[in-house]
Amino acid sequence: MIDNHALHAACLAINARVLVVFIATPKQWHEHDMAPCQEEFIYASLQQLKRELAQKGIPLYYHECDNFADSVDWIIHYCIRQEVAVLFYNRQYELNERRRDEQVEQRLSGCVRCQHFDDSLLLPPGSVNTSSGKTYKVYTPFRNAFIRRLTISNVSCYPAPKQRGNSLLMCDSSEAYESITRNLPADFPIGEQAALQRLRIFCRGKAQDYLILRDLPAITGTSSLSPYLAIGTLSPRQCFNYLRAEHPGVLKECDSGPFSWLNELIWREFYRNLIIAYPMLCKRQPFIAWTNKICWRNNAYLFQAWKEGKTGYPIVDSAMRQLNSTAWMHNRLRMITANFLVKDLLIDWRAGERYFMSKLLDGDFASNNGGWQWAASTGTDAVPYFRMFNPINQGKKFDPYGIFTRKWLPELANVPNHAIHQPHDWAKKHNLVLDYPLPIVDHQESRRQTIAVFKAAKSAGSEENKKEH
Ligand SMILES: Cc1cc2nc3c(=O)[nH]c(=O)nc-3n(C[C@H](O)[C@H](O)[C@H](O)COP(=O)(O)OP(=O)(O)OC[C@H]3O[C@@H](n4cnc5c(N)ncnc54)[C@H](O)[C@@H]3O)c2cc1C
């Protein structure tokens, strides 16, 4: 309710009734792999929002449609039925969503004025471009230009709407919608106040040490705000303004914890700018065309082992079990598990992207796609294809005492710290047998094969290019 651009603009501009409308398209969400817990998170958050808005005298109307085409028809009829003067809405940037909004604007033109807002970003998309007006493809120059722009932009937050008449009775404004809270993870309490409280605590405390702690999954060193940012409970402007209030020098202190946290928020902006400029990213296409030539192994047994956290690589397995149990995964581990699926198992990154989406409470198309394409070396400014994380070394580096690993792999409880990432070597030395899988692939062998497969795809791609020109 606070810092919602469309709501704020509507309340400011309209003296008469303001109606808030939320159109859900669960069927379409399922087709796009939305995790059941994220769907419930949205419903539960909506119910809370509805109560808060009702206290302000603003009704929230909820409607369900099968797909975007139906939602277009429905909103047009609704606007006409309710004699709506202006339709204020916050933009979404995925391709289908943009097409939907264009259709609504076209069909309403001449009868209802439409005003859209870039609510889910710090700066409107396209406002930070190269000197020739193009979208940045490389992150660091984008980030530098973004910071320069941020320094001179007004990114203050809008307050919650003022009281508009009497509080409403809860049951009179919406169709009934159920809130099932079966799948909601306990770590993420519902609602704006809970999110703001978490943001406040983080900015006051952990942000200072973020640079040191952010890569250690055994420690809660990151903000855990992603689920709130993903569904719009919290805005990135709120994040930035709270951070700047606690750390006024944040924009200049490039090697500080607060700056490096802001840097992550800017990655989020970068990926959103990319999906707008390159719509093919929304059609399951890689950014780098030759990677379409990769001969994936796509072995179903290996994929299943990865999903279940049974690869025999403790850091990968503990991460996947964290995801399956909590609907969230630490960023470092997302990088390791994605890299492992694509490079060690040679499984198409799109299978991993979909699996993450189907499990994550913070599932967000642009960030998920960006993260997967980065790890798979198919994206812009991605990790080079010949760079592969060694899952044993990654484990040793980021969970050196095995605290995180043991939490999710109780079968390794008795393995000492120094051996936790190669438990079978230790067990063999001590004539023990562990109830834990042996590594499903040999990392060095996978490395050799993967580099060869990527190399072949690259040269096939450049042959094809030559022929075309
Ligand atoms: C393969 C892969 C898949 C990912 N899928 C998603 C996803 O579906 N949804 C999602 O929100 N993030 C995704 N990320 C990015 C990142 O892992 C999460 O945003 C982060 O782990 C969330 O934890 P946090 O809120 O504690 O982050 P913090 O470290 O506290 O960062 C603050 C905020 O910045 C944003 N952010 C942080 N890192 C990134 C990043 N690398 N890219 C884009 N935004 C970032 C998030 O909104 C996050 O809440 C993915 C990363 C990878 C490598």
Image: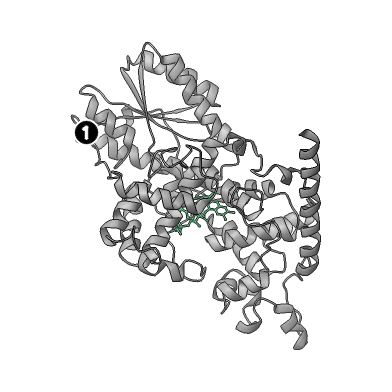
Amino acid of disc 1: Ser
Residue 406 % position (x, y): 59, 74
At 68% from the left edge and 59% from the top edge, which residue is drawn? 308
Q: Is residue 186 above or below residue 36?
A: below
At 55% from the left edge and 30% from the top edge, which residue is drawn? 96
Residue 62 % position (x, y): 41, 30
Q: Residues within 10 Å of mark 1 (few under 14, many from 20)?
A: some
Determine whether, in the image, residue 96 is placed left or right of residue 11: right
- Towards the viewer: 177 or 74: 74
Residue 31 % position (x, y): 62, 35
Tell me, yes or no, if residue 104 can be seen here: yes
Determine whether, in the image, residue 458 is placed left or right of residue 273: right
Q: Is residue 353 above or below residue 134?
A: below
Determine whether, in the image, residue 153 is placed left or right of residue 220: left
- Towards the viewer: 389 or 235: 389
Residue under label 1, please give it. Answer: 167
SS state under label 1: loop
Tell me, yes or no, if residue 234 can be seen here: no
Q: Is residue 174 above or below residue 41?
A: above
At 51% from the left edge and 30% from the top edge, which residue is drawn? 97
- Quadrant of the snapshot with the C terminus: top right
Q: Image quarter for residue 161?
A: top left
- Towards the viewer: 414 or 360: 360
The yes-or-no answer for disc 1 within 8 Å of ligand 1 is no
- Quadrant of the snapshot with the N terminus: top left
Q: Is residue 38 above or below residue 29?
A: below
Residue 287 % position (x, y): 64, 43
